[in-house]
Structures are given as structure tokens and as C-alpha cells.
Image (cartoon, grey):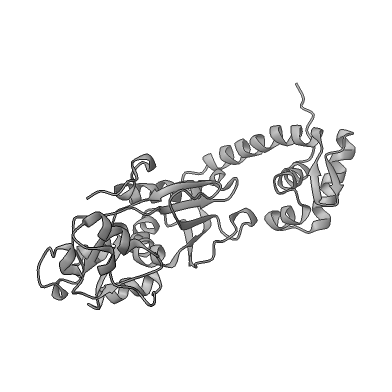
Amino acid sequence: MSRTLPPLNALRAFEAAGRHQSFTRAAEELRVSHSSISRHVRGLEDRLGVQLFRDLSRGLVLTDDGAAYLAQVSPALDAIGIATEGLAETPEGTITVNSEPLFATKFLIHHLAAFTGGHPEVNVRLEASRHLADVARYEADLAIRFVPPGARYPNSELLTNAMLHPFATPGLLRAAKPSPRDLLSYPLLRDRSEGSWDTWFALAGGVAPADVPAFTWRMSSVLSVEAAIAGQGVLLVSEEVVAGEVAAGRLVRVSDIGIREGGYHLVRGHGVLRRKAVRVFRDWLFAQTAPWRTPEEDDQPKG
């Protein structure tokens, strides 16, 4: 039985415009001109004999027919893409990963060689930035961000929510496991976390809130870790980002008392998982971070 199918380019243009509610953003995604998207969509409307979009003062919106059509077309195109990539024996292509600097420099860089060694056909472009790339506009395929407790990004998954423990160089310490009060005699480094040391001392006990030193300035997260490695003080930091420094003997965990204050999340753009290269990288990253991931309902301080 023959099928009644419109041109594939017209369907792709409509599907992208429908997801973004914008011809301009659809054109950016598909790397064509705005007029090309408009021409394909208008041609599709003529072919189907229905209006798919309405132009309103607030922008482009789908009609009821357009929304119903998009609900069918979008998963169908996803299925075609997945089936097509499934014919390839190995994933290939370029993926862009935008990450916060601390996670990029202290975790991803140290693990990335293992991924590229196993998947040489995949080119991973790693960006380190405090600015969250707009995955919806395809500035990056995946983004990694630290998310405070209770906050969420759309289309995000928990990667790590490791405990924050005090870490320092072995040469700085006068005792292997100083007490919380003993820690007050060391320089306490502070990064972007406003009240982490206050929270930690409150949990550890033995130190009055008034005895916790006031901090007059904060370093970036990357600089604070480097300062700790240089022996300049004790830093409260999550375990996964200093695991390499601990394994190399440059830092040691000062106390078994730890707190949790959020975690790193993987943020993905709509539809990026239809690409085999992105799926393989995502699965690899979740395997690498598994030791530092706890179900969020168990995300409570522990002493």
C-alpha cells in the first residue's frame, strides 16, 4: 500500500519550528535560512490544506491542527533518526559539552581520555564556563551545572551529589584527623558556597557559631582547590572533584564528617539523545559518576 507522505525537508522544518515556536530558531537548528523554513512550512500547509501556525503579537503559535500533527511527526522523526544511526556499527560525529570550570578541570579532563580512547570516532568539544550554554538553541549538546538543593533545570539528570568534606595537604596538618575545634587553627578556604563552613561546623559540633571565622572574600571554585593543593589552607569541597588529587597523595580528607549541598546535573537539549554519539557519551559519563551519586531523597547531611 502506498503512503501519503509530504517531503521530508518540509516535515523537518515544521517539526523544528513547532518545537521552538519560532522560524528563526528552527533555521538556526537546521542551519538554513529563515525564508527556507517559512517556505517549507507554507508549502506543507498548502499540501495538507490546513493552517499549522498562527502569527500573534507575542510570536508564533501552533494551531490545534498543528499541535496534533507535531505530536505525531516529532516522535516519528526521532524514530527515523535512531533507526538510521542504529545501522552504524560505531557512534561518530562531534558533540559539544559545556561544563562549569571546576567539574571540567578536576573531573572531566582526567577521565576524558578513557572515553576518546574507546570511541575515537567521537570528537568531544569541552567548554568550561560559568555561563549555562543554551542547549535549547544548540549552543551545546550537553551542559553540566552545579544545582543547589531544591532547584531544577528542565531536561536535567543528577550526575553527582557527593559529600562535602574538609581536604588539605598532608604537610599542612599537625594531626591526621584534627577535631572540628582544631580546624579553627588552620586557614579555612572559602569558595562560592556562602554558608558551607557554618553548616559543617554546626553538624560537627564542639564549635559555637560565633567562633567560626568570618570570611571577607571568596575565591572561584577552581582557585580554591588550587590553593588547597598549594598548602594554603583547608577547603570544604565535594569528593568527586578532588578524587584525583587524593589518589595522587596531594590532598587528604581531614574529617569523616560530611554534608551535602546540591549536586552536579547533566542538562540536555531537546532531541539530542537521538544521536548515538550523545547517547554513548551520556551513558559513559553516568558510569563514571556512579560512585558519587546518591538518590536525592537520601540527600541528607551525615556525621
Asked if residue 241 can be seen in this view, the reply is no
- Determine the image quadrant of residue 120: bottom left
- Determine the image quadrant of residue 132: bottom right
Give the residue displayed 36% in from the left and 41% down from the top: 295
Asked if residue 132 can be seen in this view, the reply is yes
Q: Is residue 170 left or right of residue 70?
A: left
In-front residue for pair 104/272: 104
Give the residue displayed 34% in from the left and 59% down from the top: 111
Q: Is residue 195 left or right of residue 122?
A: left
Rendered location of residue 169, percent (x, y): 19, 72
In-front residue for pair 107/2: 107
**Quadrant housing the N terminus:** top right
Name the residue at the top extreme: 1
Q: In this view, does 243 lie to the left or right of 127?
A: left
In-front residue for pair 20/300: 300
Rendered location of residue 186, percent (x, y): 20, 74
Whether 197 is drawn above or below 79: the answer is below
Whether 120 is drawn above or below 106: the answer is above
Give the residue displayed 33% in from the left and 53% down from the top: 260
Rendered location of residue 185, percent (x, y): 18, 74
Rendered location of residue 272, percent (x, y): 56, 48
Name the residue at the left extreme: 175
Whether 101 is drawn above or below 262: the answer is below
